Amino acid sequence: MKDVAIITGASAGIGKALAIELAKTYKVGLIARRVDVLAELCSEIESKGGDASFRSGDVTDESSMVKAVSEIEADLGPCHLFIANAGISSGIRLKSFSAIKSKSLYDVNLTGVTNSIGAILPQMVERGAGHIVTMSSLAGSIYTPKSFVYASSKAAVDSFAYGLWMAAAKHGISVTNLKPGFVRTDLTAKNNFKMPFMMEPDVAAKKMVKAIARKQISYSFPWQLHYLIKLITCLPLSLQRLIMSK
């Protein structure tokens, strides 16, 4: 009997790649706003012998997430693995700074995470078991003038995830915070700066699924970029600004 994994933002990019990879060993629940794309992905998974169910859901709407999660659990069974993957990148810089755009980004990247996890956490606490995965980014580990709003949203996800890990352990719930570098998706295609160590979504998904299986608290990759960022953040802020402004 396969366990159940539910993924938000499953219609494209990392979410889609994770759904395809996880479908090899899990029944997968797919949540995103674009139901036509989810239906195609669901059919693709089922054509390969997998089990899948999908629902439309908006991570910025708490009631939408509760409904989507409960309906998928009714289809597939209790959720064992929940991946709060949905996220956006706006490319907000100093000259294009907008409070409204910033709020929209935080609504998806941070509030979207809490809305998503809030839809499954009570069930996991009641069962005394489960595994929650948050999708952060290596950008959350460094100060960057080119995407400071996005980076700050991911830094907030880091803080939330590690606090959740501390609180959830006594209830039998594992938490893994994933911190990928640059992955080739529609979101990164909008970036107009150098993106070293770019990965394909399927390669990134395989790495993440292995980290999830090991129940790592945190997984930062690729290692080259992870350690480069660690080195940069050891420098004085004035030097960090010079390096990150190039």
Image: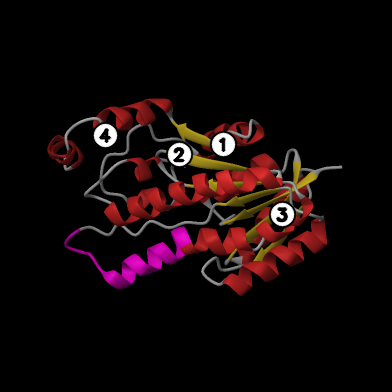
Among numbered discs 1 and 2, the one appearing first in the sequence: 2
- Residue 130, image x and y in percent? 71, 47
Which numbered mark, 3 or 2, is in the foreground of this view?
3
- Structural distance between the alpha carbons of marks 1 and 4: 24 Å
Within 10 angstroms of label 3, few (less than 14), some, or many (20 or more) residues?
some
- Structural distance between the alpha carbons of marks 3 and 2: 28 Å
Among numbered discs 3 and 4, the one appearing first in the sequence: 3
Residue at the image position 55 percent from the left and 36 percent from the top: 217
Residues in magenta?
A: 94-110
Q: Give the amino acid type for the residue marked by disc 2 in the picture.
A: Pro
The label on residue 208 is 1
- Give the labeled residue for mark 3: 125
Which numbered mark, 3 or 4, is in the foreground of this view?
3
Whether the residues at callouts 1 and 2 have beta carbons within 8 Å, the answer is: yes
Residue at the image position 56 percent from the left and 64 percent from the top: 115
Q: Secondary structure at mark 4?
A: helix
Relative to 141, say whether 149 is above or below: below
The label on residue 180 is 2
Q: Main secondary structure of the magenta part?
A: helix
Among numbered discs 3 and 2, the one appearing first in the sequence: 3
Q: Give the amino acid type for the residue marked by disc 3 in the picture.
A: Val
Q: 206 or 142, which lies in front?
A: 142
Within 10 angstroms of label 2, few (less than 14), some, or many (20 or more) residues?
many
